[in-house]
Image (cartoon, rainbow, N blue to C red):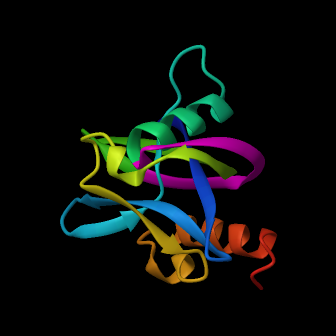
Amino acid sequence: MRREFSSGGLVVRNFQGRPFLAVVEVTRRKKVLSLPKGHIDPGETAEQAAVREVREEAGVTAEIEEKLGDVRYWYSLHGERRLKVVSFFLCRYRSGSVRDHDDEVDAALWVPLAEAPARLEYPGERDMAQRALERRGGL
């Protein structure tokens, strides 16, 4: 068994008084909405990786506010079982545009934070969006 560690960010920005969340669209077997995330590079903290991944995949610069939690799941690659742990951080938008995402994703966009728990593809990420919504006083 191998363990892998990744990090991601939930960047919230207000538009006309409503909180929106930066998400990315990727095509696996189908198009899915997910959170910007990726591997933690050697010498990098989970927080630094989250900020970097948000910049690369969502095109925006953000600042960490707090850790929301970890998502754990198992998968297999080349016949080897792997445990993946993804640490997610609630982030405040600082600058940039979702149009400036890298080519790892098909698109980056802002969705209303209140809709994110229902629109994100993966259960763990939906849970993180729900936590962000609760932190922002949405429920």
Q: Name the residue nearer the viewer: 88 or 60.
A: 60
> What segment is highlighted magenta in the picture?
58-74
- Please tell me whether residue 9 is drawn above or below residue 15 in the rendered image: above
Q: Name the residue nearer the viewer: 56 or 79.
A: 56
Q: Which residue: 53% across, 16% down? A: 42
- Please tell me whether residue 69 is drawn above or below residue 122 in the rendered image: above
Residue 24 position, x and y percent, is: 38, 58
Image-quadrant location for residue 64:
top right
Residue 35 position, x and y percent, is: 48, 57
Q: Which residue: 46% across, 50% down? A: 36
Q: Name the residue nearer the viewer: 24 or 40.
A: 24
Farthest front residue?
Answer: 16
Q: Which residue: 63% across, 61% down? A: 12
Farthest left residue?
Answer: 29
Image-quadrant location for residue 117:
bottom right
Q: What type of secondary structure mainly makes up the magenta span?
A: strand
Report whether 114 appears left or right of 33. right
- Residue 135 counted in the magenta span: no
Residue 87 position, x and y percent, is: 63, 46
- Please tell me whether residue 23 is drawn above or below residue 57 in the rendered image: below
Q: Name the residue nearer the viewer: 93 or 116.
A: 93
Farthest top residue?
Answer: 43
Report whether 108 appears left or right of 120. left
Count numbered badges in the picture: 0
User: Which part of the image, by quadrant, shows the C terminus?
Assistant: bottom right
Using the rendered image of the protein, determine whether residue 88 is visible from the camera's viewpoint. no
Report whether 118 appears left or right of 92. left
Using the rendered image of the protein, determine whether residue 114 is visible from the camera's viewpoint. yes
Image-quadrant location for residue 119:
bottom left
Residue 72 position, x and y percent, is: 58, 53
Q: Which residue: 51% across, 55% down? A: 73
